[in-house]
Image (cartoon, coloured by chain):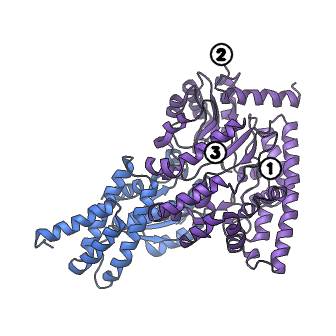
């Protein structure tokens, strides 16, 4: 779609800036206004641009985890407003991520931040929740045929559960069709090698960036 | 062969030298194994370990015997209980409910923890603390007015299914059962301390305390909610933190013999320097300085990445205690805090999980070359070592310290 006037461009730009600056009230107001004028996909694009900026600021050390938590909170509020508009329209998606905290780990703060940022980036995210046994991942991969499987976990005990999950996917003959990323505060290059994953991330924004790279986006 | 008393003295002096920013005879080593590791090493499940104090004690002793370090893996079998915060003025019984163990979880049916063999598979290597939103945003004022009463009357019934109806026969029976179980746990812990002393391990950490914001986040609001509160109702959060400092709920349980107080930090890495300097650091600093004036040193566990706040540590009095780091660059921390603060950490458990013994030896050698000179360093696992870690890799660390950690003076 082509923009018909300068004012429209600036109102979406304003949304990007308000969201990137984590001005909740202004952002929500602008979204409500934009819903009357724009295709929901364009609002979605603005969110993606904003969360990209948030991610950059986090990587640069300008933003911290509390800002990421706040950004994901604002994004979820925006989605409550925008999602109903997608009933008639098809959302533009870049890929599907199957996500869950691995067996034995019931923490989900990191997983939920990642989920919001991945959705903002245009991924469809299927969230299996917490304490997800390997077999449940296997079944869900068969059902949903995701591009990426995201294994999340906070504790060091989660690393072995990640390995068991990847082994189960391999045993089921599903490993070659998917990319696997592990995420959480305690994963690193050693954990990646140990589990046999394709990528690792210890922050939500890095995780989303790597998911895009894994799909060549 | 050394007697156990001599060994206790030797290890204690080694640690003390590091804390006092001197170069010890050998770099002190501390390895923290998770419950699953100790259970597996003793041939029992994590469930058995966490629900049978006798078996746990034997497993801890076996691990401490077979893996020779200077500090035993933190000898506790549980996590913080909300109940204790209703008992600030009843310290005679508070000590018996300060730790939420597996059996106590089963009695209280609390909503803020999950345990192997109950909610999780029996082999899960640890219980897990998830917290809960037991204080609602609109209730801050009531909490601030009288935190102890609010916790006793509102939070305790909300957070524990067995205490849902205060004054009911079930609630009264629950409280009595918790007291009995707590006394049993305290007995086993006293025995464990004695057993560890017989093995030559000094008893160091006798008390635990929290920064007010962590207390609010962990026990009353959940981490995501407290972070939103910092933006939406900052003045209420500040008042709540202030009241928790003026009248501490968690009056630090110090005994005559208390040498160290452990302060685990959770929200430190979540906060920007601006939020950290307003809602976190002033409180943490006051706690450390006040204990230091009483002759008690703190071990502060700076969870996650503390790089952005590292310099603030220099505001503390020299030799205040131990700064243990998880993901903060340990070389950078050692360099910045040299001659001021004892630095602890350096071994990520993922290295022990994945690398070969040779690589581990090389890693420890290089790390000690950079961190040992000048003293004031304790080599430690940066977080807990999980069950599947190959035992030979743990031994590789111990051997490497014997080889490269001995002072050349």
Colour applied to chain B: purple
Image marks 1 and 2: residues in contact by CB distance under 8 Å? no
Categorize mark 3 by other alpha carbons within 10 Å: few (<14), some (14-19), many (20+): some
Return the residue found at the far bottom.
A88
Crowdedness near tag 2: few (<14), some (14–19) or many (≥20) residues, C-alpha within 10 Å: few
Which tag is nearer the camera, tag 2 or tag 3? Answer: 3
- Quadrant placement of the N terminus of chain A: bottom left
* Badge nearest the viewer, 1 or 2: 2
Dot 2 falls on which chain?
A: B
Q: Is residue B50 left or right of residue B325?
A: right
Using the image as rendered, state which of residue A190 and residue A31 is in the foreground: A31
Label located before the other in sequence (2 or 3) = 3
Front disc: 1 or 3: 3
Rendered residue at 40%/53% (across/down): A206
Chain A drawing hue: blue
Identify the mark at residue B287; answer none if there is no mark.
Answer: 3
* Same-subunit check for callouts 2 and 3: yes
Q: Which residue is mark 2?
A: B408
Tell me the tag on residue B42: 1
**Left or right position of B152 against B134:** right
In whole angstroms, how far apart are the C-alphas of marks 1 and 3?
38 Å
- Earlier sequence position, callout 1 versus callout 2: 1
Q: Secondary structure at mark 1?
A: loop
Label 1, residues with CA under 10 Å away: few <14, some 14-19, many ≥20? some
Q: Secondary structure at mark 3?
A: helix
Q: CA distance from mark 2 to mark 3?
A: 37 Å
Task: Specify whether disc 1 shares its chain with disc 2.
Answer: yes
């Amino acid at each position: 779609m082509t923009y018909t006037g300068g004012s429209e461009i600036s109102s979406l730009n304003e949304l990007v800036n308000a969201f990137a600056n984590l001005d909740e009230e202004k952002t929500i107001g602008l979204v409500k206004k934009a819903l009357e004028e724009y295709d929901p996909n364009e609002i979605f694009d603005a969110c993606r641009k904003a969360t990209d900026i948030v991610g950059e600021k986090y990587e640069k050390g300008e933003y911290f985890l509390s800002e990421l938590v706040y950004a994901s909170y604002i994004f979820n509020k925006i989605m409550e407003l925008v999602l109903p508009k997608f009933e008639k329209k098809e959302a533009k998606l870049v890929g599907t991520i199957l996500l869950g905290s691995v067996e034995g780990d019931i923490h989900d703060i990191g997983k939920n931040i990642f989920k919001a940022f991945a959705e903002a980036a245009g991924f469809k995210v299927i969230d299996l929740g917490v304490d997800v046994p390997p077999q449940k991942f296997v079944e869900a991969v068969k059902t949903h045929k995701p591009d990426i499987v995201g294994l999340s976990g906070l504790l060091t005990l989660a690393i072995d559960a990640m390995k068991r999950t990847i082994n189960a996917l391999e045993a089921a003959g599903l490993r070659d069709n998917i990319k696997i990323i592990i995420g959480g505060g305690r994963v690193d290059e050693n954990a990646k090698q140990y589990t046999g994953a394709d990528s690792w991330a210890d922050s939500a924004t890095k995780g989303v960036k790597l998911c895009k790279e894994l799909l060549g986006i | 062969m050394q007697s156990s008393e001599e060994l206790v003295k030797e290890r204690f002096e080694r640690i003390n030298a590091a804390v006092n920013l001197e170069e010890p005879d050998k770099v002190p080593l501390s390895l923290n194994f998770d419950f699953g590791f100790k259970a597996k090493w003793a041939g029992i499940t994590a469930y058995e370990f966490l629900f049978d104090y006798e078996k746990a004690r034997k497993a801890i002793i076996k691990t401490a015997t077979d893996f020779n370090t200077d500090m035993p893996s933190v000898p506790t079998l549980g996590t913080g209980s909300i109940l204790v915060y209703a008992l600030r003025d009843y310290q005679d019984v508070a000590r018996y409910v300060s730790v939420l163990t597996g059996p106590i979880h089963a009695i209280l049916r609390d909503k803020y923890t999950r345990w192997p063999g109950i909610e999780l598979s029996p082999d899960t290597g640890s219980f897990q603390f998830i917290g809960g939103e037991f204080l609602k945003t609109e209730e801050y004022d009531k909490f601030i007015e009288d935190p102890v009463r609010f916790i006793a009357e509102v939070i305790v019934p909300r957070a524990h299914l067995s205490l849902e109806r205060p004054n009911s026969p079930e609630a009264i029976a629950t409280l009595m059962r918790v007291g009995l179980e707590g006394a049993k746990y305290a007995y086993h812990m006293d025995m464990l301390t004695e057993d560890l002393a017989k093995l030559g391990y000094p008893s160091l950490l006798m008390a635990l305390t929290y920064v007010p914001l962590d207390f609010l986040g962990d026990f009353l609001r959940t981490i995501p909610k407290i972070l939103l509160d910092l933006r939406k109702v900052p003045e209420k959060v500040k008042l709540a933190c202030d009241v928790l400092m003026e009248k501490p709920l968690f009056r630090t349980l110090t005994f005559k013999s208390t040498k160290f107080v452990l302060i685990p930090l959770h929200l430190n890495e979540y906060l920007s320097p601006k939020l950290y300097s307003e809602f976190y650091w002033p409180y943490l600093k006051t706690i450390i300085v006040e204990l230091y004036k009483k002759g008690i040193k703190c071990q502060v566990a700076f969870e996650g990445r503390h790089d952005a706040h590292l310099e603030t540590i220099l505001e503390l009095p020299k030799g205040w205690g131990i700064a243990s780091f998880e993901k903060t660059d340990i070389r950078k921390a050692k360099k910045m805090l040299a001659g001021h603060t004892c630095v602890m950490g350096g071994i990520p458990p993922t290295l022990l999980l994945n690398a070969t013994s040779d690589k581990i030896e090389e890693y420890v050698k290089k790390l000690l070359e950079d961190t040992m000179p000048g003293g004031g360093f304790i080599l430690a696992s940066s977080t807990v070592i999980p069950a599947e870690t190959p035992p030979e890799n743990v031994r590789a660390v111990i051997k490497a310290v014997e080889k490269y950690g001995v002072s050349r003076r």
